[in-house]
Image (cartoon, rainbow, N blue to C red):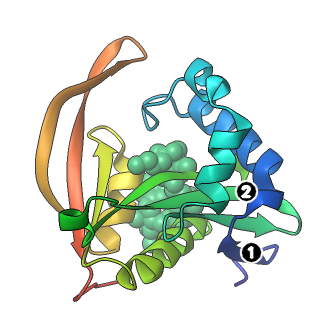
C-alpha cells in the first residue's frame, strides 16, 4: 500500500529480522511505557534465542512487521494459544508504530494482517488496551473489537495505576 508517502509493506518477520525487531521493541518499551507491560530492563534480559523462537519457531504465533523500504517501522503480534481446549482463542499483542510514521494507517494495516492470519487459526482474537490509550482504543473500535471486561489497576507505570480494558473480536464475523 501507499500510505500517503513512501510505500509500506506488511509481512511476517523471520529470523533475519532479529536485530531490527529487537531495536523496535527496545524503542517501543522505552517510548510507550504504559502501552507495554515489559520494562526496558526486562526486554534487554530476554535472550536472542528466546526472541528467535518467538519470531521463527512458534507458528502459527507470528509477528507482523511494517516496512518502509528496508526499515522496520511498525509491528503487531499474534499469539496462538497452546492449551488444547483454548486453541480457538488467539491474542493480538505488541502493536507499535514509530512516531514519525503514525497517522498513515500503518497500525490499521498491521492489525488487519493479524486479524486475517488469526481467522485461519482461531475463532476469537483477544487484546488488552490501557484505559487511557485513546489512540489505540479508537484503532481497535474501528476494526470491530468489543469490550468485554476491565482489570482495575492492572499496572503501575509512570507514577500512576492504569486499568486494562479487555477487548475481543469474534473472527467468524469480523467487521474489519
Ligand atoms: C496506537 C498506534 C499503534 C496507532 O498507530 P498509527 O499507525 O498512527 O495508527 P493508524 O494511522 O493506523 O490509525 C488507525 C486508527 O487509529 C486511531 N488513531 C490513531 N492515532 C490516533 C490519534 N492520534 N488520535 C485518535 N485516534 C487515533 C484512529 O481511529 C485511526 O483511524 P482514522 O485515521 O480513520 O481516524 C500508535 O500511536 C502507537 O504505536 N502508539 C504507542 C504504542 C501503543 O499505544 N500501542 C498500542 C498498545 S494496545
Residue 115, quarter of picture: bottom left
Query: Vertically, is 136 above or below 113?
Result: above
Q: Which residue is rendered at x = 68% and y = 34% of the image? A: 26
Query: Vertically, is 173 above or below 44?
Result: below
**Residue 98 in view:** no
Distance from disc 2 to disc 1, alpha carbons, whole Å, reads 9 Å
User: Cβ of disc 2 within 8 Å of ligand 1?
Assistant: no
Contact, mark 2 vs mark 1 (Cβ under 8 Å): yes
Q: Which mark is residue 73?
A: 2
- Spot occupied by residue 135 in the image (x, y as percentages of width and height): 41, 52
- Spot occupied by residue 122 in the image (x, y as percentages of width and height): 31, 77
Q: Indicate left or right for 111 with 70 as reference.
A: left
The total number of labels drawn is 2
- Spot occupied by residue 100 in the image (x, y as percentages of width and height): 72, 51
Task: Identify residue for label 1.
Answer: 8
- Spot occupied by residue 64 in the image (x, y as percentages of width and height): 61, 66
Taking depth in this image into account, of 153 and 82 the one nearest to the observer is 82
Q: Indicate left or right for 157 with 94 as reference.
A: left
Q: Indicate left or right for 172 with 96 as reference.
A: left
Q: Under tag 1, what secondary structure?
A: strand
Residue sitting farthest toward the top: 159
Q: Indicate left or right for 21 with 97 as reference.
A: right
**Residue 92 in view:** yes
The image quadrant where one finds the N terminus is: bottom right
Q: Which residue is rendered at x = 49% and y = 30% of the image? A: 38
Q: Under tag 2, what secondary structure?
A: strand
Amino acid at each position: 500500500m501507499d500510505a500517503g508517502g513512501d510505500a509500506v509493506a506488511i509481512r511476517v518477520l523471520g529470523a533475519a529480522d532479529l536485530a531490527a525487531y529487537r531495536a523496535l521493541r527496545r524503542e517501543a518499551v522505552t517510548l510507550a511505557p504504559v502501552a507495554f507491560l515489559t520494562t526496558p530492563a526486562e526486554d534487554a534480559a530476554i535472550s536472542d534465542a528466546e526472541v528467535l523462537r518467538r519470531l521463527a519457531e512458534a507458528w502459527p504465533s507470528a509477528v507482523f512487521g511494517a516496512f518502509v523500504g528496508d526499515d522496520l517501522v511498525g509491528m503487531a503480534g499474534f499469539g496462538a494459544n497452546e492449551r488444547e481446549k483454548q486453541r480457538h482463542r488467539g491474542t493480538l499483542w505488541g502493536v507499535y508504530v514509530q512516531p514519525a510514521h503514525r497517522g498513515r494507517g500503518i497500525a490499521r494495516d498491521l492489525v488487519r494482517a493479524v486479524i486475517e492470519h488469526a481467522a485461519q487459526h482461531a475463532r476469537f482474537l483477544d487484546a488488552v488496551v490501557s484505559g487511557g490509550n485513546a489512540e489505540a482504543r479508537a484503532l481497535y473500535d474501528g476494526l470491530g473489537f468489543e469490550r468485554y471486561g476491565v482489570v482495575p489497576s492492572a499496572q503501575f507505570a509512570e507514577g500512576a495505576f492504569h486499568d486494562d480494558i479487555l477487548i475481543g473480536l469474534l473472527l467468524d464475523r469480523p467487521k474489519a
